Image (tube, rainbow, N blue to C red):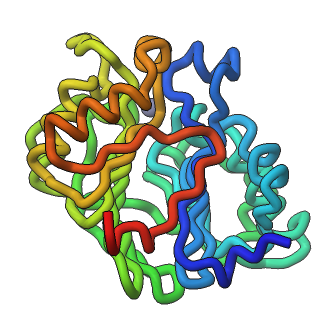
Amino acid sequence: MEDNSSSGDTITFLGTAGARFVVTKQFLASGGLWLSLGGIEILVDPGPGCIVQSTKRKLRAEKLSAIILSHRHLDHSADTNIMVEAMTEGGFKQRGWLFAPADALGSEPVIFSYLRNSLAGIEILQEGKSYQIGNISFTTPIRHIHSVETYGMIFTTADHTFSYIADSRYFDGLCHSYGGELLIINVVLLETKPQIDHLSLTDAEHIITALKPKVAILTHFGMGMWRAKPWEIAQRLSQETGVKVLAARDGMKFELSQLNNP
Ligand SMILES: [Zn+2]
């Protein structure tokens, strides 16, 4: 039996799909990130299939302390309702927190009204704010440039600090706002497309070079990125940036202890 509480701090990639076609065809899974940090379980961006990807890996939603949405786009939020239902044991146990930007909870909310009362509470993400989940804290340092309200996060555990740069158009604020030993970065585009509010490979290389984490993990791949073999791209980026760059794979579990000797 897998015991997630005693195996150290881990991040499980329940999906690596980024753009619309990769998600709608399920060429790659799209379930988000499952964080297991000092016995605290946190789910980030439960996209389509999160319930399937998490149960398949025996990750137990009833142990979740919180679900965090970077933004309301479907590939980050589609399974919010079912994951809230699972976290609250069918709505019978009032527990767990939902963190989301204001526009994910407004006139067209990502969560059904009948499920809201089963949560311990809802917190609205705002630029520059810090939040606490047990002994884990996270901040949402800067609002991203994306078609809906979007934030990345910097997580601080007892032993480690890591950043997650969610969807955004490139702007210099990304290089000034994030940091930590590990950087998880959503790289949808192989080539920069100015009309699309997503990071390209060139943007990611620039950000990794500026932030110099111990390890960077590329994820959230569009079709072009996927066809270009992200694991080969990661190898090249490692050589060019001097940072250990990995490409996430569906189901990959990254142990934060790896940051001690990258
Ligand atoms: Zn998006």
Residue at the location (45% across, 21% down)? Answer: 229
Quarter of the rendering occupied by the N terminus? bottom right
- Give the number of marks: 0
Q: Residue 72, image x and y in percent?
A: 52, 40
Q: Is residue 252 above or below residue 91?
A: above
Query: Is residue 33 in sight in this rendering?
Result: yes
Q: Is residue 241 above or below residue 138?
A: above
Q: Is residue 143 above or below residue 87?
A: above
**Front-most of 67 and 262?**
262
Quarter of the rendering occupied by the C terminus? bottom left
**Front-most of 230 and 32?**
230
**Front-most of 156 and 58?**
58
Q: Is residue 258 left or right of residue 196?
A: right
**Front-most of 226 and 117?**
226
In which of the image's four quarters is ligand 1 placed? top left
Residue at the location (68% across, 49% down)? Answer: 80
Residue at the location (15% across, 47% down)? Answer: 242
Query: Is residue 110 in sight in this rendering?
Result: no
Q: Residue 118, image x and y in percent?
A: 78, 70
Q: Residue 151, image x and y in percent?
A: 35, 50
The quarter of the picture where residue 236 lies is top left
Q: Is residue 98 left or right of residue 184?
A: right
Residue at the location (8% across, 40% down)? Answer: 172
